[in-house]
Amino acid sequence: MYGTNIPCTGTTHFKGNLVVSMRPYKSQDLEAVVEITKRYPHMHGEPVSMGFDNNLGILDLNKPLFGDIVTIESDEIPVFWACGATPQLIV
C-alpha cells in the first residue's frame, strides 16, 4: 500500500490523503480489469490510476507504506485502487 498526494474530503477533526493498493497487469488486460472492477463500486471499484506517471505522488514503488514490495515485470503496468486502510491512517 502506498500513501498518495490526493487529499480526502476532511472534517473538522479528521483529514488526510488517500492510500492505494497496487497490482501489476499486462497492458492487454487493462481494459478487462477496469470493466470487471468497476462493477463493484462498494468494494474497491475501478482503479484510481494506472501507469508510472506519478500522478498520485508515489515517489518509489519499491518503498510501500505497508506490505511487501511487488515485482513489476517489464511487460506490466502498475494499477492502483483506493484502499480501505485510508481511514486508519487518518484517525
Image: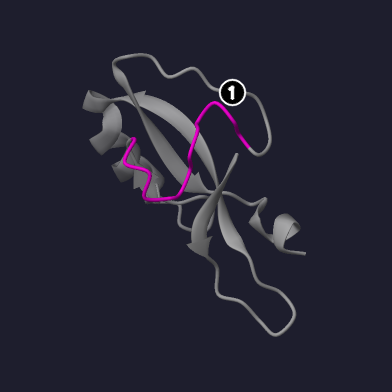
The quarter holding residue 68 reads top right
Is 82 on the left or on the right of 47, as rendered? right
Quarter of the image that includes the C terminus: bottom right
The magenta stretch is 52-64
Q: Position of residue 38 (x, y in %)?
A: 37, 51
Looking at the image, how many numbered discs can be counted on the residues?
1
Report the quarter where the N terminus lies: top right
Image x and y of residue 88, in percent: 74, 56
**Residue at the limit of the structure toward the bottom, as seen here:** 12
- The residue indicated by pointer 1 is 69
Tell whether 35 sits left or right of 44: left
The way the protein has been coloured in the rendering is: one colour
Hey, which quadrant is residue 67 in on the image?
Answer: top right
- Is 24 magenta? The answer is no
Q: Please provide percent x and percent y for residue 6.
A: 48, 60
Depth check: give the residue in front, 25 or 69: 69
Which element is circle 1 on?
loop
Tell me where residue 86 sits by quadrant.
Answer: bottom right
- Residue drawn where x is 50% and y is 33% of the image: 60
In this rendering, is residue 8 above or below 61? Answer: below
Q: Looking at the picture, which amino acid does disc 1 mark?
A: Ile
Residue density around tag 1, few if under 14, some if 14–19, many if 20 or more, within 10 Å = few
Residue 7, given in percent of the width and then of the height, sits at 52, 66
Query: Which residue is most to the front?
Result: 59
Q: Is residue 63 magenta?
A: yes
Residue sitting farthest toward the top: 74
Q: Is residue 57 above or below residue 60?
A: below
What secondary structure prevails in the magenta region? loop
> Residue sitting at 72 percent across and 56 percent down?
89
Along the line of sight, which residue is nearer the eye, 26 or 33?
26
